[in-house]
Image (tube, rainbow, N blue to C red):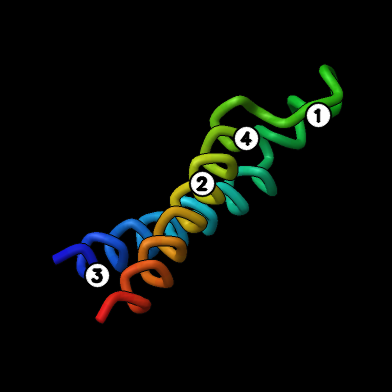
Amino acid sequence: MMKAVSVAVLAGGILLLIFGINAYNSSSSDFSRFFTGSATDKSIWMLVGGVVATVLGLGGLLRGSKRV
């Protein structure tokens, strides 16, 4: 059961990373970076959430595979 949850969290993290990268490279982020020097909050939160979810998913998969 934990392996399935870990795979789902990993997949969600990868999707968040993909959407975060697309949002970071969007025209609204370019516009925001031009005036404020930083990307939009939405793109930053998607990237951070994607990294955290990916690490948690990988950690769950690696930890679960060591049990006998």
Q: What amino acid type should be assigned to the residue bearing mark 3?
A: Lys
x and y, in percent, of residue 44 in the image: 62, 35
Q: Which residue is mark 2?
A: 52
Secondary structure beneath label 4 = helix
Q: CA distance from mark 1 to mark 4?
A: 12 Å
Q: CA distance from mark 2 to mark 4?
A: 12 Å
For this rendering, which residue is in front, 4 or 63? 63
Q: Name the front one of labels 1 and 4.
A: 4
Q: Which residue is mark 3?
A: 3
Q: Which residue is mark 4?
A: 44
- Residue at 53 percent of width and 54 percent of height: 17
Relative horizontal placement of residue 42, taking residue 57 as reference (left or right): right
Relative horizontal placement of residue 32, taking residue 10 as reference (left or right): right
Q: Which residue is mark 1?
A: 33
- Residue at 25 percent of width and 81 percent of height: 68
Q: Give the mark nearer the N terminus: 2 vs 4.
A: 4
Q: Residues within 10 Å of mark 2 (few under 14, many from 20)?
A: some
Q: Is residue 57 above or below residue 52?
A: below
Q: What amino acid type should be assigned to the residue bearing mark 2?
A: Val
Q: Name the front one of labels 3 and 1.
A: 3
Q: What amino acid type should be assigned to the residue bearing mark 4?
A: Ile
